[in-house]
Image: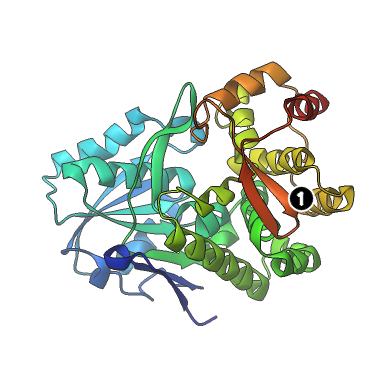
Amino acid sequence: MDARTINVELGERSYPIVIGSELLGGNFDLNGHLVDGDCLIVSNETVAPLYLDKLKANLAGSDIRTVELPDGEQHKTIETVNKVLDALVTSGANRDTTVIALGGGVVGDIAGFAAACYMRGVAFIQVPTTLLAQVDSSVGGKTGVNHPQGKNLIGAFHQPRIVLIDTSTLATLPTRELQAGLAEVIKYGAITDARFFAWLEENIAALLDLNPDAVAYAVQRSCELKAEIVAEDEHEAGRRALLNFGHTFGHAIEHCLGYGKWLHGEAVAAGMVMASQLSGIDSVEVNRLENLLVAAGLPVKPPAVGAQAMLDAMGMDKKVLQKQLRFVLLEKIGSAHVSSDIDRSLLEKVLEAAN
């Protein structure tokens, strides 16, 4: 597949998302996207052995330093961010240093947050290697870490200079991680693009088989939809909140279980089903969503962590405004809205049924 470019239009902070196969290994010159020829690559113990040397070939001639983090959501903490900051300080990095994230969503969030904090902000590049990161977390500038009381409570908006997506990295992705990424792909169709949702219903098996054409289209369409929403609402003051469909429930599941027990996409999948039940839409629409998630190999019901525990966790969610829970609700497949006008008895019914 020839590389395709999607632009995230944010004025002076605009940047390209470049999507293609075999882009790592020197097949795309990243040097032109560095502030200067000085960079720190942040990766983890799983991804670095696979792709670090390939990425270095895309940066030939640059002054490259690296830091390798432990792998897993449980390490998405301030302490891990400090490892990146220590690496920047120890290497004498200054404001023309570019931080490059090579890995999944956790690596991207940590590296981006460190870049936002160091010297009050240095340049940042995303090179996502998981499906979830390629279609969601690498685009839009959300960075941050978890707190024991809630997911992503500490963070900053810090847009990358470029997102370089090499879809061939998905060949080394464990099946469970691939399935988790599909949850975010399905989310885009559910909230804003009924035709894409219908395409996913027809092509979910091809995506699980990593059919190159199917993967290329799913990643491209997901990025197009997110780029459009981010350009309209960079800091989540309005429409961008739609991207949180299933996340209020999903984050509560992750918090109650303990970070890392379920993958983020798995929790979001169950959360989307719960949110669709709370929406009060036709059961046929709820069933379509549930059936597609099942076909993708994803859970559609959370573990029994307790209705009250989930409710307490949702109370600490960063989407709460004026002490009111807010949910993304479906109007139908392909259309959604944000609401805090929730039937409390229906919410309790949904929670009790899931637990």
In front of the other: 162 or 174: 162
Expressed as whole percent of the image width and height from the top left, the position of residue 174 reads 62, 50
- The quarter of the displayed image where residue 198 is located: bottom right
Expressed as whole percent of the image width and height from the top left, the position of residue 347 reads 74, 29
**Residue to which mark 1 is pinned:** 293
Residue sticking out furthest to the front: 341
In front of the other: 341 or 248: 341
On the picture, is 122 further left or further right than 270? left
Expressed as whole percent of the image width and height from the top left, the position of residue 85 reads 23, 38
On the picture, is 272 further left or further right than 346? left
Residue sticking out furthest to the right: 284
Residue sticking out furthest to the bottom: 2
User: The residue under label 1 is which amino acid type?
Assistant: Leu
Residue at point 74% right, 45% down?
Answer: 298
Expressed as whole percent of the image width and height from the top left, the position of residue 156 reads 34, 42
Q: Quadrant of the N terminus?
A: bottom right
- The quarter of the displayed image where residue 116 is located: top left
Q: Residues within 10 Å of mark 1 (few under 14, many from 20)?
A: many
- The quarter of the displayed image where residue 265 is located: top right
In the rendered view, would you say 194 is above or below 77?
Answer: below
Residue at point 69% right, 33% down?
Answer: 342
